Amino acid sequence: MHDPATINAAQPTTVNVDLGDRSYPIFIDHGLIDADLVTPFIPASRAVIVSNTTVAPLYAERLAQSLEAAGKRVELLALPDGEQYKTLETLGTIYDFLMEKQVDRKTTLIALGGGVIGDITGFAAASFLRGIPFIQIPTTLLAQVDSSVGGKTGVNHPRGKNMIGAFYQPRCVVADTGSLETLPDRELSAGLAEVIKYGLLWDEDFLAWIESHVADLRRRDPATLTEAIRQSCLIKAEIVRQDEREGGIRALLNLGHTFGHAIEAGMGYGVWLHGEAVGAGMCMAAELSRRLGLIDPDAVKRVETLVESAGLPTRAPGELSVERLRSLMDSDKKVEHGRLRLVLLGRLGQARLVDHVPEETLLETIAYTTGATP
């Protein structure tokens, strides 16, 4: 735990993740990469920044200079950019670099990038020398509202997304909204999928706020983005506080993800962005919820309208057959005892975990939302 008074920066918006002696802050504001927020969270004199070839040229030098000015010795590793590189092979590249630099147990890894960098760097930190400190500096909206918070780390396997990993919490998360100014429009929309998810699964008032502010979010209004990130992180922090290791309600955060992960795997990682697949996946989950009598058609329309207004697809790719998508869903982490468990909507603002979905209804839903035939 750290005393906020020791942080030499203007007070940013802060959300705390309450996990006892593993609690940590999420700092949200513009220009935080230039501020020296992270220095108090680096326990020794060495740090390794892990980034990618897209983000490193934009922000790594600024961050390194800030840390070096504070007396830290900094190394930089820039990995290839893309979901297709979230693999055991890339993880091995990080290990090789850490071995070459003779990293010790007090060296801090700093993940500077989007969700791929955060996930793979966190897993490297969790497993190298059986655990070394790490810090998240997410530079995409999706990472700022979701993947950087909660301690899920890992890599993909050709047969399933995030199948290899560990729960390992960062020492802090620094969400610089200024980094969103260089984010491609498609990536920004992908991040909005996760923002929408929080409203759908937890808070209908937040959902209504998103609906009324989606245009401002897409045009990157700084105050609106900060509020969306804050609200999203508050919801995720509360869920993680109650269920850190996904034994219960944390599974609700996977709304749209079982369908979405199947789309990503079926198309090839990186063809559809994660948020794009989740956007379609949430619409598929809403349609299945309707077919099971949990929500009405107006609710489904409301979900589809918001997803579309965020610049996201509302349907799965037609080139994936019903059989292929259904098969890939069985590789999802939420399969228990051979039974597929799906996060569905009991109403807007309230998700539920369902593990008794009739197979015929599921296949019909997939067919309807892809335009295919079962």
Image (tube, rainbow, N blue to C red):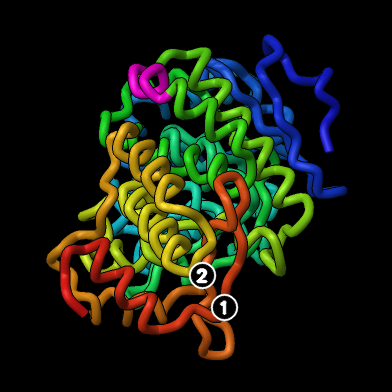
User: Is 293 in front, or is 335?
Assistant: 293
* Badge 1 element: loop
Magenta range is 214-219
Q: Position of residue 141 (x, y in %)?
A: 44, 34
Q: Are marks 2 and 1 in contact (CB under 8 Å)?
A: yes
Residue type (three-letter) at the residue carrying disc 1: Asp
- In depth, the one of 238 and 51 nearer the eye is 238
Q: Going by the picture, which residue comes out furthest to the bottom? A: 338
232 relative position to 265: left or right? right
User: Is residue 65 shown to the viewer in this render?
Assistant: no
Q: Residue at x 44, y 61 (%)?
A: 290
Task: Point out residue 346 in the picture as x, y percentages from the top left corner.
Answer: 59, 57
Residue at the left extreme? Answer: 319
Q: Which mark is residue 342?
A: 2
- Disc sitting over residue 355 in the figure: 1
How far separated are the C-alphas under marks 2 and 1? 6 Å
- Which amino acid type is shown beneath numbered disc 2? Leu
| Coordinates of residue 182 in the picture (x, y in percent) | 32, 23
Which element is circle 2 on?
strand
Placement of the C terminus among the 4 image quadrants: bottom left
Q: Quadrant of residue 232?
A: top right
- x 49%, y 47%: residue: 118
